[in-house]
Image (cartoon, rainbow, N blue to C red):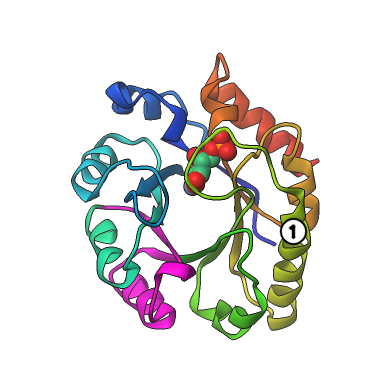
């Protein structure tokens, strides 16, 4: 397992002041940027131009989570935009191995996401191609949803597969992660934690980042 990393999602921050919002979390490891196209998920956020502007001012690297159709064609633009990590959904990719290789060779970390109902087993052999696996713990689309405990066994199985293959792939969880639920995720084997509403509804977001880190390490 890698070291614990906390990755606040700006989805529930103030979009009219994104530059200021990312400046409030200097203690984070990454800033998680939820890109939504209103097709893969029923919500719409921003595209590569905005992400590029954010990458220029963010104190920490950007972790793009692409909830968009046709990932094969659309993901490379987010490496271009300056993201340090680019996550595509396997449900939206026709050739995930080729896409992961393309992201890596363009200079970003390659990551693949699974929705709650998507099993990990068919993708075991693909894990060495990835720098990170994202296991969603809510249905993608919106912040502030309730953590789905039914995803915990999948996190455990994914961690066991990585151990079996002796690979260093990071294991990220996203959705409903808070002071309440982060320990369960860490115990199951996650090491990278996205937290949106928990961080941006806190009075001091950076303090919440530190509190989440402490809980995950306990
Ligand atoms: C949901 C997004 C998440 C979301 C997390 O589709 O992928 O990154 O912002 O928000 P919380 O932590 O509030 O569930
Ligand atoms: Zn996300």
In the rendered image, residue 217, in percent from the top left (x then y), is placed at 75, 43
In the rendered image, residue 104, in percent from the top left (x then y), is placed at 36, 72
- Residue drawn at x 63%, y 58% is 116
Q: From the viewer's side, name the closer residue of 116 and 126.
A: 116
For this orientation, the residue located farthest to the top is: 203
Q: Is residue 197 left or right of residue 89?
A: right
Q: From the viewer's side, name the closer residue of 180 and 106.
A: 180
The answer to whether one can see residue 11 in this image is: yes
| Residue wearing tag 1 | 189
Q: Eyeballing the image, is 209 above or below 173?
A: above
Looking at the rendering, which quadrant does residue 68 occupy?
A: bottom left
Q: Eyeballing the image, is 169 above or below 24?
A: below
In the rendered image, residue 67, in percent from the top left (x then y), is placed at 41, 55
Q: Is residue 131 magenta?
A: no
Looking at the rendering, which quadrant does residue 98 occupy?
A: bottom left
Q: From the viewer's side, name the closer residue of 208 and 14.
A: 14
Which quarter of the rendered picture does the C terminus lie within?
A: top right
- Residue drawn at x 72%, y 56% is 151
Q: Which residues are magenta?
A: 82-110
Q: Eyeballing the image, is 130 above or below 2?
A: below
Disc 1 packing (10 Å; few <14; some 14–19; many ≥20): many
Q: Is residue 185 left or right of residue 106?
A: right
């Amino acid at each position: 397992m890698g070291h614990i990393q906390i990755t606040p999602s700006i989805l529930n921050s103030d979009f009219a002041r994104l530059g200021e919002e990312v400046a409030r979390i200097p203690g984070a490891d990454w800033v998680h940027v939820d890109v939504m196209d209103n097709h893969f998920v029923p919500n719409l956020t921003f595209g590569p131009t905005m992400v590029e502007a954010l990458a220029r001012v963010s104190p920490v690297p950007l972790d793009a989570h692409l909830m968009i159709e046709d990932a094969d064609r659309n993901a490379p633009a987010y490496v271009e935009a300056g993201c340090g990590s680019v996550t595509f959904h396997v449900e939206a990719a026709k050739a995930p191995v080729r896409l992961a290789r393309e992201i890596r060779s363009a200079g970003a970390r390659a990551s693949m996401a699974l929705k709650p109902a998507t099993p990990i087993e068919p993708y075991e052999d693909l894990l060495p191609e990835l720098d990170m696996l994202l296991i969603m713990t809510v249905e993608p689309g919106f912040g502030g949803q309730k953590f789905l405990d039914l995803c915990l066994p999948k996190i455990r199985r994914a961690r066991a597969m990585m151990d079996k293959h002796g690979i260093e792939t990071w294991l990220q969880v996203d959705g409903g992660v808070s002071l309440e639920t982060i320990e369960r995720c860490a115990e199951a084997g996650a090491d990278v934690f996205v937290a949106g509403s928990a961080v941006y509804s806190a009075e001091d977001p950076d303090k919440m980042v530190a509190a989440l880190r402490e809980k995950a390490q306990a």
